Image: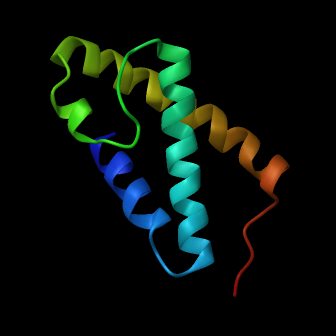
Amino acid sequence: MYRLAGDGIKYTQAKSEDTQYKGQVYQEFLKVLKDLSNVAFDHSDPKTLIRMNLTVYTGLNRLAIELAREWSFWAPTILGEAEDL
């Protein structure tokens, strides 16, 4: 999750619109995770994840895995299938 948070910030500052979109998706994922978990962390500051109690972080990570599975199930329906360039 730490890398996801860092990449989300980095990608939103990129020049490519596709890369910016990827960063926005990462940030939105972390916002939803925060809302679902009721765990206080700043999705725009990866350091808040590092400072987190290990037990809380582990539980949050498990929830993130389940949320990612759910998102990946619905993504093709909502966003469409990926196209080859």
Asked whether, in this view, residue 48 is left or right of residue 12, the answer is left
Q: Residue at x 37, y 64 (%)?
A: 10
Quarter of the image with the C terminus in it: bottom right
Q: Nearer the viewer, residue 11 or 76?
A: 11
Judged left or right of residue 72, residue 43 is left
Residue 40 in the image: state x and y as whole percent.
37, 18
Nearer to me, 34 or 59 = 34
**At 38% across and 48% down in the image, what residue appears?**
4
Report the colour scheme. rainbow
Tell me if residue 55 comes above or below residue 32 in the rendering. above
Q: Residue at x 64, y 32 (%)?
A: 70
Q: x and y percent of residue 43 in the render?
A: 41, 37
As displayed, is residue 50 above or below residue 79? Answer: above
Identity of the residue furthest to the bottom in this view? 85
Please state which of residues 81 and 5 is positioned toward the viewer in this rendering. Answer: 5
Q: Image point 45% across, 29% down: which residue?
A: 64
> Residue 22's spot in the image, x, y percent?
55, 61
In the picture, the quarter occupied by the N terminus is top left
The part of the image, by quadrant, that contains residue 56 is top left
- Against 38, residue 64 (above or below) is below
Q: Is residue 35 left or right of residue 45?
A: right
Across the whole image, how many numbered discs are drawn on residues? 0
- Position of residue 70 relative to residue 37, above or below, is below
Which of the pair 28/66 is nearer the observer?
Answer: 28
